[in-house]
Amino acid sequence: MRMAQGIPDEVLMNSALIKELAEGAKDSAVTQGVLMRLQETPNSSEVVSFAPFTLFPTPVPKAVFSQALAVQTHYNTLVDKISQDADFLQEALASTIAVDDFTARLFKIHQQILKEGRSQSIVLGLNRSDYMLDQRENDTPSLKQIEINTIAASFGGLSSRTPDVHRHILKMAGRLEESERILDNNPAAGLARAIAKAWELYGSEKAVIVFLVEDVQRNIFDQRFVEYELWKRNIHVIRLRFEDVFKAGSLDQDKRLFVDGKEVAVVYFRNGYMPDNYTSEQSWDARLLMERSRAVKCPDISTHLAGTKKVQQVLARPGVLDRFFPDQPQAVQQIRATFAGLYTLDMGPEGDKTVSMALAAPERFVLKPQREGGGNNIYGSEICQVLEQVKESTGRTAYILMDKIHPTPVRNYLMRQGSPLKLSNCLSELGVFGAYVRQGKDMVTNECVGHLLRTKSSEHSDGGVSAGVAVLDNPLLF
Ligand code: ADP
Ligand code: MG
């Protein structure tokens, strides 16, 4: 049914045209800056290629798209409130940190900061809430949140450059009407606006912004687009790794953070969300140093923890959301409408029920460990294998269970450097970027700053763009 809203067969099946469009599309992507470094040379920009993207945009119903944008400022508020509720975080994460060393380590930093007292009242939050459209038979599709990323949410930069690529491809294909339906999108500008606001509130003209980046930097251009928005405002940005901060970073007696003699106003983490990012004890020392400092952290350690999958599951329990929005039933309702079924695996009768439900119909669920970064989830018969091993022990509390979402497949070509052109059945995931700045009790800005559509072949049940599975896309609203 949705195909009628998208690209017709006469285009999809015309191999001469597709070949021509694909060549034009690559040139357009490269000239627009939709770029990624090569896998072979991840730390060099001498030779680069286009970042993976779909040849055509993907139809998305207007109503669900607007719904996703409209709920974003509430999600921003929610994340921010959770980050300030130490009791809630403690209770929600208790069973996870008992078995998951990585989350436990983050939690320990969080506790240390609480004990010392936060040295900075300015909070900068940049997040991305991800959704899939659940299609049950002939119903209208419903927007279901996959997860919210409160640290290192990527592709705000590159997704600011893809609309013009799809417009161009559609024009080449003679689809002018569709090309005019591609939305403008500029998350890079919105993310940078919030970072700049935090920098300004910090109040030191000479202070720099640190992008805390990985050792392997294939996706650097995505970050550069955000960075350039800051340079435009004459704000100085430096890129550092944990190791650099460990070697050259220190706090003065007011806990101001200095690296190589430069005062740091804001640390924007594009790294630090998975265990492998911490290559040694030095990385952890550097994280702690930054958290203790007066620099504005994006995210601070508590906001990082607010984005965990365990917190997401706890929020779905009856009454929990209401606690964060006591006077805003409308916000509660809007947020709750986007929740898929989420189930605890904590020890006790409720968790036992989750185990038997999953074992009875594993194809209906996704089993998620407390991890970020793609490729960690467990599906189908593997759910039974894993649960059979851990179901009697606290090992099971390292996971949550979630209803599997079923989007309608749409055919498209996935453009990847070095891969042959092939028509694929594809599934899409819509991300919405949120940005906010709070100073003490005062929410200074709270915005939805753009979107991201990622699409992958339906053969893959998991994995993002960086994992080489999903590719960049644009919604074609209908
Ligand atoms: P990560 O932190 O690794 O990105 P996600 O929760 O986003 O974890 O899951 C990774 C991918 O797995 C998603 O991008 C999506 O493709 C797939 N996925 C996750 N949850 C579901 C679900 N409930 N139903 C269907 N697919 C899912
Ligand atoms: Mg994800």
Image (cartoon, helix red, strand yellow):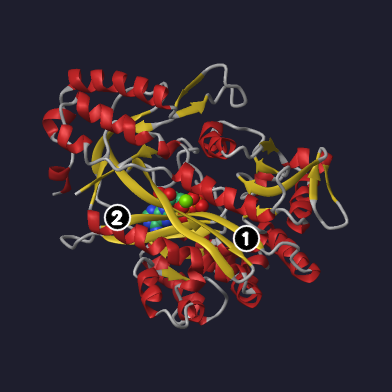
Instruction: From the viewer's perspective, tell me whether residue 444 is left or right of residue 130.
Output: right
**In the picture shown, does residue 457 fall above or below 408?**
above
Mark 2 is surrounded, within 10 Å at the Cα level, by few (under 14), some (14 to 19) or many (20 or more) other residues, namely many
Label placed on residue 424? none
Tell me which label, 2 or 1, sits earlier in the chain: 2
Tags 2 and 1 in contact by the CB under 8 Å rule? Answer: no
- Which residue is depicted at the point 18% across and 26% down? 173
Can I make out residue 385 in this image?
no
Of residues 442 and 10, the one drawn nearer to the viewer in this rendering: 442
Q: Amino acid at mark 1?
A: Val
Q: Which residue is mark 1?
A: 123
Instruction: From the viewer's perspective, tell me whether residue 190 is left or right of residue 166.
Output: right
Of residues 340 and 398, the one drawn nearer to the viewer in this rendering: 340
Q: Amino acid at mark 2?
A: Phe
Nearer the viewer's eye, disc 2 or disc 1? 1
Quadrant assignment, res 161: top left
**In the picture shown, does residue 319 fall above or below 28?**
below
Quadrant assignment, res 68: bottom left
**In the picture shown, does residue 406 fall above or below 235?**
below
Q: Which residue is mark 2?
A: 65
* Whole-percent x, y for residue 150 in the image: 55, 56
Give the structural element (helix, strand or loop) at label 1.
strand
* Whole-percent x, y for residue 283 in the image: 75, 46
Can I make out residue 466 in this image?
yes
Residue furthest to the right in view is 253
- Which residue is depicted at the point 49% across and 28% down? 36
Instruction: From the viewer's perspective, tell me whether residue 328 is left or right of residue 22.
Output: right
Distance between the alpha carbons at the discs numbered 2 and 1: 28 Å
- Which residue is depicted at the point 53% across and 17% down? 47
